[in-house]
Structures are given as C-alpha cells and as structure tokens.
Image (cartoon, helix red, strand yellow):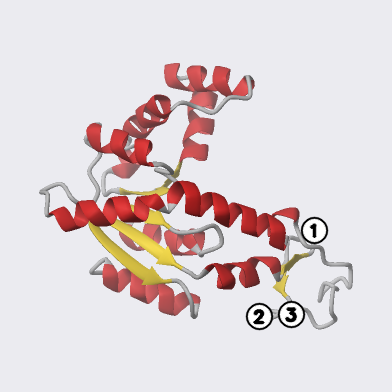
Amino acid sequence: MKLILLGAPGAGKGTQAKFICDKFGIPQISTGDMLRAAVKAGTPLGLEAKKIMDAGGLVRDDIIIGLVKERIQQADCANGFLFDGFPRTIPQADAMREAGVALDFVVEIDVPDSAIIERMSGRRVHPASGRTYHVKFNPPKVEGKDDDSGEDLVQRDDDQEETVKKRLAVYHEQTEVLVGYYSKIADSGAADAPKYVKVAGVGSVDAIRDAVFQALGA
C-alpha cells in the first residue's frame, strides 16, 4: 500500500496516518524525519541539505526527491509507505512522478475551515504533563485548570485563531492545488495513476478511520 495523505493542518491526518500504518504494516514518512535522519547519518544528500538548512535556506526539491527515493528503498518500505506532508507543491509532485515513485492511492481528509478553526483554537494544554483538553469537546472539570494538578492550562501559539487562519491560507494557496492535480491524474485512466479518494474528516475518529479503510478496500 503506497499512498499520500492530503488535508489541511488540523484535519486529523496524523491520527488517521497511524491507523493506516498499523493496518498495512507500512512506515509513515515525513520529509522532516527524512531530512533529520539523512543529516544524522551524514549521507551525501544529508550533508548537502544540512549546508542549506544551516544557512537558513529551503532545501531544494531535487534533494528532497533524492531522499525520498533513498528512503523507499529501505527494508521497512517492502509493503509500501505513507507520505505525510509530501509532496507539498506541484513541482514536487511532478518530480516524484518523473522519478518513477509509484502510488496506489491519494487520500484527502476533507474538513471545512470553520471546523478546523473551532477544533484547533479550542485546544488547551497542561504544559508540565502534555495533557490536552478542548473548551467544547473535552473541557476540564474546572475552566482553565488541569484536572489532576489544578494548574493553569495554556493555549499554544500554534492553536491561536489568527495563526490557524494563516496556516489554512498557506495550505489553500500552496498545497490544496494537489487535490486537483491528483484528481485529474486519477481521472485520466493512465496505467500508473493512483486512485483518488476523498473522506469527510468530521465525526468520531473511529468513524473516519472506518471510512478511510473502506475507501482503501481494507
């Protein structure tokens, strides 16, 4: 099972990725993890990427694609893989196709912006333990206080409404175009075209998981 998971930040991709990886026995591959591993291992691509990152630059697509090709040759990818947060742009998607990286499925977890804003901006965290709450969906017993310690809960910067809106704007501008890109390829009927499926990412986690598995024929 070789697939890409698409969806806006806060759509629940991380949760569903874990279910998929456990079900099919495949690794979840993120570009961040790959870069860190390659830098740590001191591979030629890793050293090149480190130079760019140390200078504060963005790692070039050709290096990313090279890392992807190296990564999917590893033994744990024998049954497939799940790409998380990659490709992010059309040039990356094009480069991946040109490199002959085959895919079975592209799965989009579709959640309206309003639901994501409510979901993320309502999160509260107890910094010492990492326990998380939600003002609406999972409120603490006492407003603003951790259930166990009674200490103050905080809203992370990433979860503030303005930050969430900015992240969604970036997603719509840069990454959402991949939805159209992969839909078009799937509709083309090309031999190497992955199947494109859209799953509504609202409702219970288990219901979304079951819908994803059904879409993947599992």
Labelled disc at residue 137:
2
Marks 2/1 in contact by CB < 8 Å: the verdict is no
Q: How many marks?
A: 3
Relative to 23, residue 147 above or below:
below
Q: What crowding class fits label 1: few (fewer than 14 Cα within 10 Å), some (14-19), or many (20 or more)?
A: some
Quarter of the rendering occupied by the N terminus: bottom left
Residue 116 is situated, as x and y percent measured from the top left of the image, at 58, 68
The residue located at (36%, 31%) in the rendering is 65
Dot 1: what SS? loop
Could you tell me the amino acid type at mark 3?
A: Pro
Quarter of the rendering occupied by the C terminus: bottom left
Dot 3 corresponds to which residue? 139
Dot 1 corresponds to which residue? 127
The residue located at (47%, 46%) in the rendering is 174
N-term mark: 2 or 1: 1
The residue located at (70%, 58%) in the rendering is 162
Is residue 38 visible in the rendered image? The answer is yes
Marks 3/1 in contact by CB < 8 Å: the verdict is no
* Distance between the alpha carbons at the discs numbered 3 and 1: 16 Å
Toward the viewer: 69 or 130? Answer: 69
Toward the viewer: 46 or 166? Answer: 166
Toward the viewer: 11 or 139? Answer: 11
Residue 24 shown left or right of residue 203 in the figure: left
The residue located at (28%, 70%) in the rendering is 215
Could you tell me the amino acid type at mark 1?
A: Pro
* Distance between the alpha carbons at the discs numbered 2 and 1: 19 Å
Could you tell me the amino acid type at mark 2?
A: Phe
Dot 3: what SS? loop
